[in-house]
């Protein structure tokens, strides 16, 4: 019988697409599919399953600063994520529990304690 919640960290990568002339733009047009694939490849290569899951999602409504990524349970949002940023997010945040501040969409939220919580840690 599966245990819930099944993941220690759950990553959602917006891959929404809009017409090219849409003023908001879209994450897909900014390389979201490549970002998603890099997350998935690293989760596989680093044998992070089943503790960590990375998956695509629809529009997160932060289109202008895409590619948009959000990590739960911390609810840390990232903006303008490029393929070159994914390794750092995986190693620093997903594995070691330390969000990548330079990519965060919001400043520290009140519920953030600053506590580092490594995956699989006590
Ligand atoms: S298109 Fe990605 S957040 Fe809206």
Image (cartoon, rainbow, N blue to C red):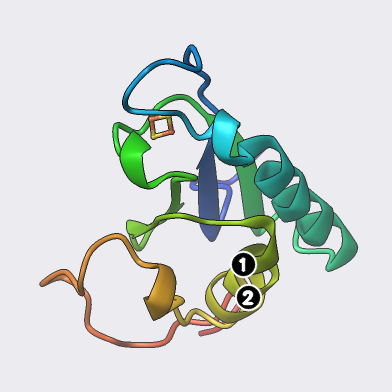
Q: Residue lying at the far front in this picture: please name it.
A: 21
Q: Residue lying at the far left in this picture: please name it.
A: 110
State the image coordinates of residue 15 (x, y, percent, origin top left): 56, 30
Identify the secondary structure beneath mark 2.
Answer: helix
Identify the secondary structure beneath mark 1.
Answer: helix
Q: Is residue 39 left or right of residue 122?
A: right
Q: Is residue 60 left or right of residue 27?
A: left
State the image coordinates of residue 100 (x, y, percent, origin top left): 46, 77
Q: Which quadrant of the render holds ligand 1?
A: top left
In contact (CB < 8 Å): disc 2 and disc 1: yes
How far apart are the alpha carbons under marks 2 and 1? 6 Å
Counting every numbered tag in the picture gives 2
Q: Disc number at residue 88?
A: 2
Q: Residue lying at the far top in this picture: please name it.
A: 19
Looking at the rendering, which quadrant does residue 109 occupy? bottom left
Q: Is residue 89 left or right of residue 40?
A: left
Foreground of the two, 82 or 122: 82
Q: Disc number at residue 48?
A: none
The quarter of the image holding the N terminus is top right
Within 10 Å of disc 2 (Cα), the crowding (few <14, some 14-19, many 20+) is few
Q: Residue at the spot x=20%, y=71% of the render?
A: 107
Q: Nearer the viewer, mark 2 or mark 1?
A: 1
Q: Is residue 30 above or below residue 49?
A: above
Q: Disc number at residue 85?
A: 1
């Amino acid at each position: 019988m599966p245990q819930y919640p099944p993941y220690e960290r759950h990553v959602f990568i917006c891959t929404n697409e809009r017409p090219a002339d849409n003023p908001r733009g879209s994450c897909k047009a900014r390389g979201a599919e490549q970002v998603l694939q890099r997350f998935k490849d690293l989760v596989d290569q680093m044998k992070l399953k089943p503790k960590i899951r990375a998956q695509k999602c629809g529009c997160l409504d932060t289109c202008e600063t895409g590619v948009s990524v959000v990590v739960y349970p911390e609810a840390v949002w990232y903006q303008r994520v490029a393929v070159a940023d994914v390794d750092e997010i995986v190693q620093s945040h997903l594995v070691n529990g330390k969000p990548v501040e330079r990519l965060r969409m919001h400043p520290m939220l009140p519920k953030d304690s600053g506590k580092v919580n490594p995956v699989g840690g006590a």
